[in-house]
Amino acid sequence: MHITPDSKVGALLEYYPELEEVLMAMSPSFKKLRNPVLRRTVAKVATLRQVAKIGNIPLSNMINDLRKAVGHASDYSIDSDDSISEPMPTWFDRDKVTTSFDARPVIEAGRNPMGEFFKILDEADDSGIVELITPFVPAPLIEIARGKNYLVWTEQIADDKFQTYFHRDLAEEGN
């Protein structure tokens, strides 16, 4: 199995179980992969590109460290910046946050908050902004939301606190 930015974490760990410890050593947020619920759900869909953002690790470093651990050539490089830092978008207005969901207690209890969050998102006012609070960048969830015509922006508040904002892209739906 080739280790690429688009490799799914779950498949990677099934093929190379020895990489679990390597991943855990890269970032404290990866220790959550030991949670059986997150392992069965998030790890199945999360790519290394997404996980690098979650752990705030340069993607090329992650790929090369994993490749080296299994005896593959570690010559991967990437020119683009995969950091989570993005400027505040023009659509964002803190006063328009109508709903906030803190997923940290759900995650700490060993459950996946994705279903609960999407129910909240689906029920939210289309003109408002929904805030999601997590201990890491919820990269797979962000991709799903973007596929459902949501504009998304994440800001890091602390090492283990990320606030991600979702706003329905009504202009895109009109097309």
Image (tube, helix red, strand yellow):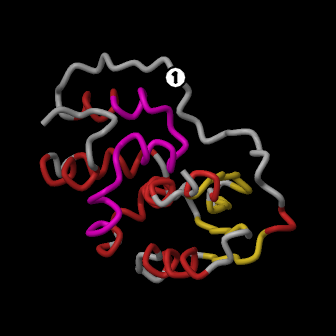
At a point 65% along the width and 59% down the height, the residue shown is 162
User: Which percent across, then down, holds residue 21?
Assistant: 30, 50
Magenta part mainly helix, strand or loop? helix
Relative to 26, is 150 on the left or the right?
right
Residue placed most toward the observer, 74 or 94:
94
Q: Secondary structure at mark 1?
A: loop
Which residue is drawn at the image coordinates 31% and 59% (left, top)? 43
Q: Horizontally, is 18 left or right of 123 in the view? A: left
Image quadrant in which the N terminus is located: top left
Q: Is residue 86 above or below residue 157?
A: above
Whether residue 156 is in magenta: the answer is no
Is 45 within the magenta? Answer: yes
Where is residue 174? Give x, y as percent: 58, 56
Q: Residue at x 68, y 39 (%)?
A: 86
**Residue 8 rendering spot, x and y as whole percentages:** 27, 48
In the image as oriented, which residue stretches furthest toward the right? 95
- Direction front: furthest residue: 175
| Residue 167 in picture, x, y percent from top left | 66, 61
Residue type beneath disc 1: Ser
Q: Quadrant of residue 135?
A: bottom right
Q: Nearer the viewer, residue 59 or 122?
A: 122
Q: Quadrant of residue 78?
A: top left
Task: Give the mark count.
Answer: 1
From the viewer's side, name the closer residue of 100 and 10: 100
Above or below for 94 versus 80: below
Highlighted magenta segment, given as a residue range: 39-63
- Between 163 and 31, which is closer to the camera in this rendering? 163
Location of mark 1 (residue): 80
